[in-house]
Image (cartoon, helix red, strand yellow):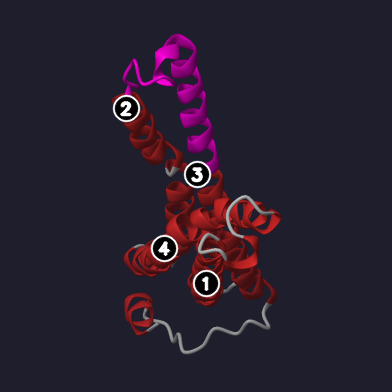
Amino acid sequence: MDEVASFAQLPFKEVDIAVPEIFVGGLLGSMLIFLFSAWACSAVGKTAQEVVKEVRRQFIERPGIMDYKEKPDYGRCVAIVASASLREMIKPGALAIISPMAVGVVFRILGHYTGQPLLGAKVVASMLMFATVAGILMALFLNTAGGAWDNAKKYIETGALGGKGSESHKAAVTGDTVGDPFKDTAGPSLHVLIKMLATITLVMAPIFL
């Protein structure tokens, strides 16, 4: 806020979320977290489906794999995962970079017509604060829930609650399938998102004024 006030030569001491436009910015920040998390988890599902298709193709074209008479093409699966992991994160990455800039510019123009020269900066500040709070809570939830599902499966595999092959184990495997993207993809990605939003907002502050 001090940097923005110094650059704009205007007082900037508070972000009042009672102002409708600023509150909308906060809502957009919270929505950004949920949309980013959804796209990150969806990326894992799409990549997994590509690997499944490749494995099925190899089983059909190389029936000797099941009898250990032929070697699978491991490199093809690794290549699919490597390329898909980069391709599928383009959309969430673009969302994180473009969103604060787009919101700031749109509300800067609106502020120009309504006589509020710092409206763009205030809306982006609100967006950043809401996104940070929602992001920390969401990351905590995803990391904890994902770890709990993973450990539940491991616990049952020790022989508890019927052990392997039981209905409890089948349910835990399903939970672990959801938990892995939570704790390994979406949760850690949110920590990066929070830092990146703050950096982009500060660096691009001049375009909001």
Rate crowding at label 2 as few (under 14), some (14 to 19) or many (20 or more) other CA atoms within 10 Å. Answer: few
Confirm whether the magenta stretch covers residue 71. yes
Compare residues 173 and 199 and report the one nearer the observer.
173
Q: Can residue 102 be seen in this view?
A: no
Q: What residue type is labelled 1?
A: Thr
Instruction: Point out the frontmost of discs 1 and 4.
Output: 1
Q: Which stretch is magenta? A: 45-74
Residue 162 in the image, given as x and y percentages of width and height: 64, 61
Residue 46 in the image, given as x and y percentages of width and height: 53, 36
Q: Name the residue under label 2.
A: 74
Quadrant holding the C terminus: bottom left
Rate crowding at label 1 as few (under 14), some (14 to 19) or many (20 or more) other CA atoms within 10 Å. Answer: some
Q: Report the Cα–Cα distance between label 2 and label 3.
A: 19 Å
Where residue 44 is drawn, which disc sits there?
3
Q: Which amino acid does label 4 sit on?
A: Pro
Q: What residue type is labelled 3?
A: Val
Instruction: Tell me whether circle 1 and circle 4 mark residues in contact (CB < 8 Å).
Output: no
Instruction: Point out the frontmost of discs 2 and 3.
Output: 2
